[in-house]
Amino acid sequence: MELLHAPWRIDYIRAPKSPPSDHSLFTRIAQSNDDAANFIVCRERTCYAVLNTFPYNGGHLMVVPYKQTAELSDLTDEELCDLMKLVRRSVEVLRRVMKPDGFNIGMNLGKVAGAGIVEHLHMHVVPRWNGDTNFMPVIADTRVLPEALADVAARLRAAFAA
């Protein structure tokens, strides 16, 4: 049997975990002033775009409203429109910077639908390339990301700012 090593994961495993809070992870990230450490690549008036630290693929972004809610009906029309506009802009930036062949875009509402952060809805924008599904995720339940998150975040942040 081949062994795969992911030594960078130990920092996450050993890191102190935040105590339970009324504020979601996304609210805490939004309130932080360290966008680089949190992989925030763009801030808009009612929402922001952040790299997923547990991505399906390189460049996997999440577009998150500042308002913490689990329900689409709790967003105003303006917030909902801003969310979709930032999703569209994210696709444009990812297309320009990473040159994917396509995208998966979606939202998981509720735990049974796969939401990892149930209390704070968000849209996933996942760039896809022909042939990006290989034996690693299928056989080894492992994804290989060819570029570090900090490097992807820096390239995307510069493109959003342009």
Image (cartoon, grey):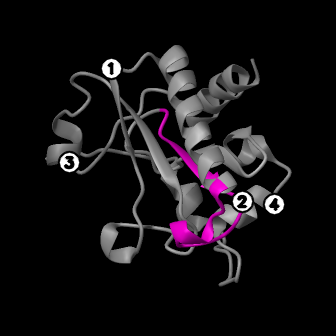
Secondary structure of the residue carrying tag 4 is helix
User: Horizontal and vertical percent for residue 125?
Assistant: 46, 40
The answer to whether the residues at label 1 and label 4 have Cβ atoms under 8 Å apart is: no
Spatial separation of the CA atoms under disc 2 and disc 3 = 36 Å
Earlier residue among tags 3 and 4:
4
Asked if residue 103 shows in the view, the reply is yes
Q: Residue at left 37%, top 44%?
A: 56
| Amino acid type at image mark 2 | Tyr
Residue 60 belongs to magenta span: yes
| Amino acid type at image mark 1 | Asp
Q: Residue at left 65%, top 72%?
A: 24
The answer to whether the residues at label 3 and label 4 have Cβ atoms under 8 Å apart is: no
Crowding around mark 2 (Cα neighbors within 10 Å: few <14, some 14 to 19, many 20+) is: many
| Disc 3 target residue | 140
Foreground pick, 3 / 158 = 158
Q: Is residue 3 left or right of residue 75?
A: left
Crowding around mark 3 (Cα neighbors within 10 Å: few <14, some 14 to 19, many 20+) is: few
Q: Which mark is residue 101?
A: 1
Spatial separation of the CA atoms under disc 3 and disc 1 = 24 Å
Foreground pick, 33 / 151 = 33
User: Horizontal and vertical percent for residue 7?
Assistant: 48, 47
| Amino acid type at image mark 3 | Ala
- Find residue 28 and report its image quarter: bottom right
The span picked out in magenta is 59-77
Q: Quadrant of the C terminus?
A: top right
